[in-house]
Structure formats: C-alpha cells, structure tokens
Amino acid sequence: MTTTSLFGIAWLGLATALAVHVADEALTDFLSVYNPAVRKIRGHFPWLPLPTFSFRVWIAGLAAAVLLMFLLSPLAFGGVRGVVLAAVPLSVIMIGNGLGHIGGSLYMRRFMPGVWSSPTLIAASLFTLICALRLL
C-alpha cells in the first residue's frame, strides 16, 4: 500500500470518527455542559472569543464539516497537498478535543458528553497526523 493510499484511508477514518463523535455529543447533550462552561469562562475572561451555540447551529456546522471531509476524501486518496496540509492542524485539534473530553471526565469524576467516542477520535487523529507528516 502506498503512503498516499494510507493517507486516504486515515482521512476517511478521521471523518468517520468525527461523525461518530458528533453523534456521541448530540446523544449525550453536550451543549448542556458546553454552553454553561463557556458563560462561566467568559465571566472570568471576557476577552476570550468563545461562542455559545443553539443545537440547530451547532449540529448543522458539525454536519457540514463532516460532510466536507467525506467530500474531500477522493482528494485525500490522491494525496492533494492542500488536504494533506489541512490534515495536520485538524488532527492536532481533534486530538485536543478528545483529550479535553477525557480530561473533563476525570476532573468532574463522571462521564462527560462525548467521552465514549474520544479514544477513537484520538486514535484516528494520530493515524491521520502520522500519515500526513509522511507525505510532507
């Protein structure tokens, strides 16, 4: 298997892991935890540009992002440089996202929304990051 093909598989895996993660968050009422936390953080640090979301806007934005990733999959399998470059920060952000859910669960001493799919999101992100860096 070529390095380019492996990157395409990794990209598709990350898109799938993100779709599962979004479903996990939606099914476990992520926004009921996220929005109050953002409001509290803004109370202490009003200069931080942290948004709050309605469910409709939040799910539509994430669904669009996942759909875009799937639509870009043929380009990923072709090793198109722009997709490979985009995969690096995206992977790093998704690793942080997954770690945030796990860390939040440990801190709160309970399972937080999105924690169940976080290990898969982290694994898919690490694989995508490694494959992308091999192509750069």
Image (cartoon, rainbow, N blue to C red):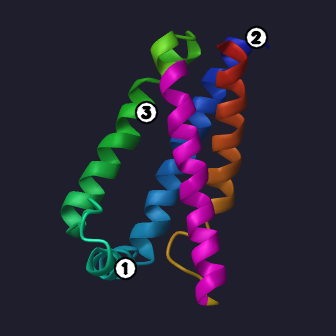
For label 2, count other residues whose C-alpha is less than 10 Å away and answer few (under 14), some (14-19) or many (20+): few
Please name the amino acid that badge 3 sits on: Met
- Vertical placement of 3 versus 27: above or below? above
Please name the amino acid that badge 2 sits on: Thr
- Tell me whether the residue at label 3 lies in contact with that at label 1, contact meaning CB atoms closer than 8 angstroms: no
Nearer the N terminus, badge 2 or badge 3? Answer: 2
Q: What secondary structure is marked by label 3?
A: helix
Residue named by callout 3 = 69
> Residue lying farthest right?
1
Identify the residue at image location x=71%, y=36%.
127
Region of the chain picked out in magenta, as a range: 84-108
For label 3, count other residues whose C-alpha is less than 10 Å away and answer few (under 14), some (14-19) or many (20+): many
Question: Horizontal placement of 67 versus 120: left or right?
Answer: left
Identify the residue at image location x=20%, y=59%.
57
The quadrant where residue 72 appears: top left
Residue named by callout 1 = 37
What type of secondary structure mainly makes up the magenta span?
A: helix
Question: Horizontal placement of 40 versus 100: left or right?
Answer: left
| Disc 3 versus disc 1: nearer the observer | 1
Residue named by callout 2 = 2
